[in-house]
Structure formats: C-alpha cells, structure tokens
Image (spheres, rainbow, N blue to C red):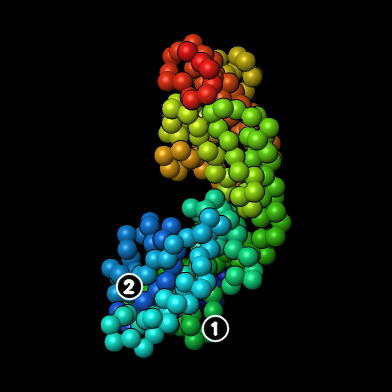
Amino acid sequence: MARAAVGDDDYGEDPAVNVMCHCQRRGAQLFLGQDAHLHLYEHGGAAQVAGVHSQALPDLPDGTFDLDQLELTIREAHGSRYHPRPELICLENTHSSAGGRALPLTYLRQGLGAPSGAVLAGRREFVSEAWRVRKLLGGGMRQAGVLAAAARLGLQQAEETLRRDHDNARHFAEGIQALDSPLCSINLAAVETNIVMVNVQGAWPSPAELCDRLRAVGEEEVAETGQAVSVLLLPWSARTVRAVWHRNVSARDTELARRKLEFVARKCQEELALGLHPTPPGTGGA
C-alpha cells in the first residue's frame, strides 16, 4: 500500500482504480437467497438507492437455491405486464449464513486482507459505468490506489492465505468434535471454508453468555492454564455462535482458542453440576 501508484480518481488520475451497474432501470428485479447478506443486512439498499426490487428465494442448507425454481420464477416474470423485469441474479459465495459454505463450480473471498472488503471487476465499459454510478451517489475516491494495492496483493496471495485460514478453521471444528461436550457441537460436513458455526445446546449458557465467557479473562483461567486468552466469537442465532478466520489468525491462535473453549465448557459443566444454572436436558445434573 505504501508503494502504490496513486492519484485523484475523480479526475481519472488513479491507475488502480453495484447493483446499479447491472440494473440500470428503476423497477428492475434481482433474484437472491432469502438468507443472503445483501437481502438481510444492508437496509434494503437495492430498493432504497437503486429502485430495484428483490425477489428472495428459499435457501437450501448449503447456501444455494433450487435452480428449477429460479428458472420458473424468471420465466414467470420475463415479458410479463405485471412483474418487475428480471435483470440480475445475486449469489453469495462463500455464504455466511450457511456457515461459510462454498458454492460448487457447477452451480454457477473472504479473508483476503482487502481493507474495503470487496473488489468490483469487469470489462472496461462496465467499470466506466460503475464510476459514473459512484459519482451519482456522491462518491469520489482520492488516492484509491492505496486500497486497490491491498486488494491486488490479496488476490495474488489468495490461494495460500485461504488454504491456511480454511485449515485453521477445520482444526478448530475438529477440536470441538473431539471435545464431545454436552454444551456445544459441530457439523463437520458443513465446515468448508473459514467460517465455523458452533451449535450451543441446552438451556444454559446461551450463545451470548458463551461468547461473553470466551471473551473474558479471569484469575482462575490464568492459574489453571497459565494463559490469558480472550476469544471473540459472534452470537449468530438463538442456538448458534460463529467463528471466522482471517490472515491475522495463526495456527497457534487457533489452538489457544480451542483450549479456551475447552476450559469454558468444563467450567460451565461444573457450574451446572452444582445446580447453579438450568440443567441441559439429558445430562443428569441437579
């Protein structure tokens, strides 16, 4: 980034330097999964900003959706006097809500270190249109090459970086399975990339409480393990927490996180045995 060639992209000086680029008519329609990040977590931006209608299709467990249903839905809308015009299909890959599942190549980025989180690529005409739309929304990028340089480096090192992240995530998931705790479990078949969804079982702890304990560091932990480790996981749903790996999480960090989860699970089980919290079904505690 420090050596990146930069300039003012507003004047076309920067050499390195979404929906609106694909759907250029208001009232157009895009198709996406009902659990897609674009559908759930971006304030309906496609409708608010671009005037594009989103048609959400049911997601399958692996993050894809039924292609026959997609084709039928497009056929119903195409040429209709009553339906929005179908112009775009959005596929999330990897699929966050599905636990980082990777879409198979026959069906049709995460953690690369690009600081803005995304890269828009395409033909020269498409990128020119993207530049125009960005200006329409009030955007102007000064010295954008700093960001583009990081994105380019991320792509160049992607294979090595992703393989390391995926291996670390797999190691963590296998550690949870080997732990065989009544408090948490894992579906190893669903661990394909750098995201691990941990199933939280029983009445206590909740996903939020488990994450609080993984983040906190106490004297008892230091005395027993000789380590002071804080692990940041996300309470994803009513019975799930999410763990995500990136280029700055090493194999050593992963092993420390696994040990911290083992420590927390053991302490929670001890408290349950003492009757301090609601007992998970089937554990035989007080």
Mark 1 residue type:
Arg
Badge 1 crowding class, 10 Å Cα cut-off, few under 14, some 14 to 19, many 20 or more, is: few
Residue 65 in the image, given as x and y percentages of width and height: 50, 65
Q: Secondary structure at mark 1?
A: loop
Query: Total marks drawn?
Result: 2
Mark 1 lies on residue: 123
Query: Which residue corresponds to the image point at 36% horizontal and 76% vertical from the top-left?
Result: 29
Give the residue drawn at x 64%, y 48%. 189
Q: Residue 223: x percent and y percent?
A: 60, 14
Q: State whether residue 51 is above or below residue 199.
A: below
Nearer to the camera, 183 or 47: 183
Instruction: Name the residue type under label 2.
Output: His
Residue located at (32% from left, 80% from top): 84
- Answer above or below: position of 136 versus 142: below
Residue 158 visible to an observer of this rendering: yes
Q: Residue furthest top?
A: 274
